[in-house]
Image (cartoon, coloured by chain):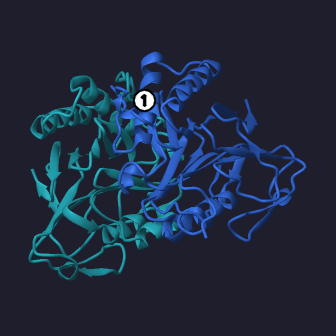
Chain colours: A blue, B cyan
Amino acid sequence: MWIYGLMCELLGMNANVPTDIRFSFAALAKRGGETGPHKDGWGISFYENKGCRSFHDPKPSAQSELAALVKNYPIKSRMVIAHVRKANRGRVALENTHPFTRELWGRAWTFAHNGQLKGVKDLPLSFFRPIGTTDSEHAFCFVMDYLVKTFPDCPPPKVLDREISDLFAQLRGLGVFNALLTDGRSLYASCSKKLCYIKRQAPFGTATLIDEDVRVDFAAETTPDDKVIVIATQPLTHDEAWTVVTPDSTLILRGGEVI
Amino acid sequence: MWIYGLMCELLGMNANVPTDIRFSFAALAKRGGETGPHKDGWGISFYENKGCRSFHDPKPSAQSELAALVKNYPIKSRMVIAHVRKANRGRVALENTHPFTRELWGRAWTFAHNGQLKGVKDLPLSFFRPIGTTDSEHAFCFVMDYLVKTFPDCPPPKVLDREISDLFAQLRGLGVFNALLTDGRSLYASCSKKLCYIKRQAPFGTATLIDEDVRVDFAAETTPDDKVIVIATQPLTHDEAWTVVTPDSTLILRGGEVI
């Protein structure tokens, strides 16, 4: 039985130290065609300092050899975005598989989205253009295009925070825009109506996944200074207190903290 | 004993039908720290229609779990670029690991390079900027930047062929520029002094890798209409007649043919 909704599911992680995402990704990957209906591809992007690597597969994550590799490969990262897809706009194909990445101001920007945006393809684009046919990638290009036209170089964090919040509010006006955007330093999370997060810090406890019979003792894997925030469409564990993000708002994470 | 030179090694494939690259990649991966000294990371990019996926690892390919996965994962593609790295400029890091990718005109462009380019970082960039610190990525951004400033939209193939050939000639003037660039349709190969290719078509024969005791009977894996060109820094098989690319020239491949 699928206990989740019919949308895509998002997962983001931001930490102040390189952190292993495998525990959370295991749950998300299960929802890609096993405990959830998100069988139309999946992707995950990890930052390692300025470098960013992504794994994409148009196959269901629950049956993907690549997903199996990612689940077993101890990549440690301060910033991760992942997505499992239930196609509504744009055929099932590699080029329509989130997260999408573009370079802006000498940094890799990565984006994943769930929801539908009415008329988003009428928004004109000049520089950044979609490779695939999803609404989501068009929305991403719209944000990147606006930023590069407004700021030839990267503005200070607070200016950028405000600008991206405004752009996200504009996109939420077109429909459902639950989305994660990052340049590897800040994680911008747009919540139309469904997004929640958990902040893990000392004293660390244990947690048990909802989708799989897996339990982790974070105290054994962390130091007292570690701060990790995991953000997801729906809670991934059933014994932690997840905070629901205020509908129609943007949440900004940096260094494992809510800004 | 390392029987190869101290440069990075390049591998490209262009075919008229989706083709399995594993045979050739197995040889290249061995040169990443085992039969060759290219231990400072490796990467491979596959096109599947307009979609492009890349695997990057700053670890030596000969010891990389990811490389082991790619060697066993039957991705079929018409266009592939791969690279094993011997760092000379830019530290060993994910962001310095080839191939590099950028979106231009709604297509993913991918680039890998071996050689050193004197003063390439003095070439001004406006729109496309390097994420890492290699000469190679700067040269790639220079090409992309010139193209977007010269052509707001993708020009006809012949115009683009000429323009990229001119840009490559300019870069060869700065040093050693053996490089592969593709938008998934055309493969542009710059040869300063070391590049060769093999064209495989009916009647297909067999071939044996130099770096590993592996032999393939292409006749069993192809149809009579298949055309596949593999291009590499040095021959990958010892029982086929590889063609040496003319030094100081650009070779263009499309649909499994030399243009």
Outermost residue, right direction? Answer: A203
Q: Mark 1 falls within which chain?
A: A
Residue A166 can be seen in this image: yes
Number of marks in the rendered image? 1
At 35% from the left and 72% from the top, the residue drawn is B211
Please state the horizontal and vertical placement of residue A98, each as a whole percent of the image: 47, 49
Q: Give the side of residue A249 with respect to residue A226, left or right.
A: left
Looking at the picture, does residue B30 appear above or below residue B174? below
* SS of the residue under disc 1: helix
Q: Which of the pair A129/B54 is nearer the observer?
A: A129
Looking at the picture, does residue A85 appear above or below residue B108? below
Q: Name the residue under label 1.
A: A142
Please state the horizontal and vertical placement of residue A248, each as a whole percent of the image: 63, 32
Q: Give the side of residue B162 with respect to residue A189, left or right.
A: left
Quadrant assignment, res A209: bottom right
Q: Which of the pair A99/A108 is nearer the observer?
A: A99
Q: Give the side of residue B41 with respect to residue A230, left or right.
A: left
Quadrant for the N terminus of chain A, please: bottom right
Please state the horizontal and vertical placement of residue A87, each as a whole percent of the image: 43, 54
Q: Which of the pair A181/B115 is nearer the observer?
A: A181
Looking at the picture, does residue A227 appear above or below residue B54? above
Please state the horizontal and vertical placement of residue B153, each as a whole percent of the image: 22, 30
Quadrant for the C terminus of chain A, please: top right
At 23% from the left and 74% from the top, the residue drawn is B238
Q: Give the side of residue A106 with respect to residue B45, left or right.
A: right
Residue type of the residue flagged with mark 1: Phe
Residue B6 can be seen in this image: no
At 31% from the left and 73% from the top, the residue drawn is B210
Crowding at dot 1, Cα within 10 Å, few <14 / some 14-19 / many 20+, comes out as many
